[in-house]
Image (spheres, grey):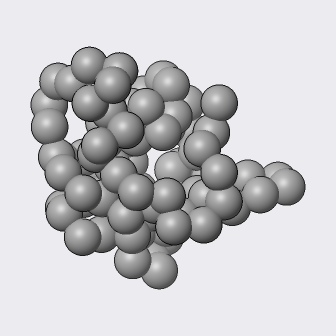
Amino acid sequence: MRLDKFLKVSRIIKRRTVAKEVCDTGRVLVNGRVAKPGTNVKVGDIIEIQYASKTVKAEVLSEKEHVTKEEAKEMYRILQGEEIE
């Protein structure tokens, strides 16, 4: 699954366009490497999102195309930081 789509479907970032913009600025790392919006993510990957004042690190637990709001939280596990609102 594409990184920008995963961030949106999992609700780590609310909108896909915002997820794409964050990726384009080089503030998203997948397994320690700068990732583009089209980077494929798979189960076990570590995604790190760097914001101005905080960093959020999450592990991918599952890939699903469509999920409910409740199921979205089961797609990842926060390793560092806190969820993005």
Describe residue 32's horizontal placement relative to residue 44 as left or right.
right
Describe residue 59's horizontal placement relative to residue 22 as left or right.
left
Residue 11: image quadrant is top left
* Residue 9 image offset from top left, x and y in percent: 31, 30
Q: Nearer the viewer, residue 33 or 72?
A: 72
Q: Say how many tags the image has.
A: 0
Residue, x 32% and y 33% (percent of image)?
72
Q: Nearer the viewer, residue 53 or 62?
A: 62
* Residue 6 image offset from top left, x and y in percent: 31, 42
Using the image, determine if residue 59 lies above or below residue 7: below
Describe residue 6's horizontal placement relative to residue 52 as left or right.
left
Residue, x 48% and y 23% (percent of image)?
15
Of all residues, the one furthest to the right in this rendering is 53
* Residue 77 image offset from top left, x and y in percent: 40, 57
Using the image, determine if residue 19 lies above or below residue 15: below
Using the image, determine if residue 20 lies above or below residue 56: above
Residue, x 51% and y 34% (percent of image)?
13
Task: Report whether residue 48 is seen.
Answer: no
Residue, x 62% and y 39% (percent of image)?
84
Task: Report whether residue 76 is seen.
Answer: yes
